[in-house]
Amino acid sequence: MEQTRGRFAGPPLTPRTAVIWSVLRAELDRRGDAELTVLDVGGGTGGFAVPLARAGHRVTVVDASPDALAALTRRAAEAGVADRIAAVQGDGDALAGLVEPAGVDLVLCHAVLEVVDDPTAVVAALATALRPGGAASVLVAGRAAAVLGRAMNGHLDVATALAADPAGTAGPRDTLRRRYDAPGAAALLGTAGLMVEEIHGVRVLADLLPAAVADGQSAALVELERALAAQPPYRDLAAQLHLFARRPA
């Protein structure tokens, strides 16, 4: 991909990223040839940051892992976009002290809100970082999928705990501190004044299919994921929920 702005081609679509990139591509196309300032919270090794930088945008990645940021730096250099990516070590809970207010056009916050201490404060920091009219791409773990997944694997006790817990966790051994349904995630963004424009399911089927099917029919699976992503009840059973929201202008 060339480092020129305009219509965004993006990286090859996969069943795990196709829906998110489809939404982001529409926003970038809407912005035309403008150079955007992007903040990627929890962006790790640059799976989203590097393609956005290659498309001509400037990206700051905030991540708690120094190893991930080191890999990001190498990846950016190999892609020829080291000058367009800044790496900042820090976690989501400290975001308010790491970024300037109203200086960002697009925020990515993927797989962060389910692990931070205070998701309400993190969402408030995201909204504060956005310029009026700026957009937020937020990806969270889906509660229903976690319940069904445990039950289908025979762990009915864990599924019961997940279904009953207000935060959607299965106790102290759970790797996530909370999971969301679509109304709950939208309400969380609303507390910061963000207006949710779209909600899609991510990995509606990808985690349920045998590897031979998913790998052998990848293109068909991508198209099916995109077709089902916005349609309840399929959307609400996805492993993750993707919310696209905007700070009012």
Image (cartoon, helix red, strand yellow):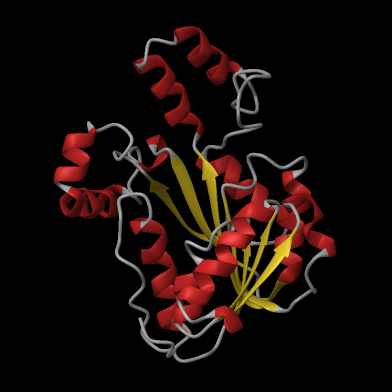
Residue at image coords 56%, 37%:
180
* Image quadrant containing the N terminus: bottom left
| Percent x, y of residue 81 | 52, 81
- Residue situated furthest right in the rendering: 97
Which of these two is toward me, 7 or 227? 7
| Percent x, y of residue 223 | 21, 55
Is 109 drawn above or below residue 168 in the view shown?
Answer: below
| Percent x, y of residue 222 | 24, 53
* Image quadrant containing the C terminus: bottom right
| Percent x, y of residue 111 | 57, 47
Left or right of residue 214, residue 68 in this image: right
- Residue 175 figure quarter: top right
Residue at image coords 46%, 92%:
33
Left or right of residue 199, residue 216 in this image: left
Left or right of residue 79, residue 213 in this image: left
| Residue 136 in view (yes/no) | no
Residue at image coords 72%, 42%:
116
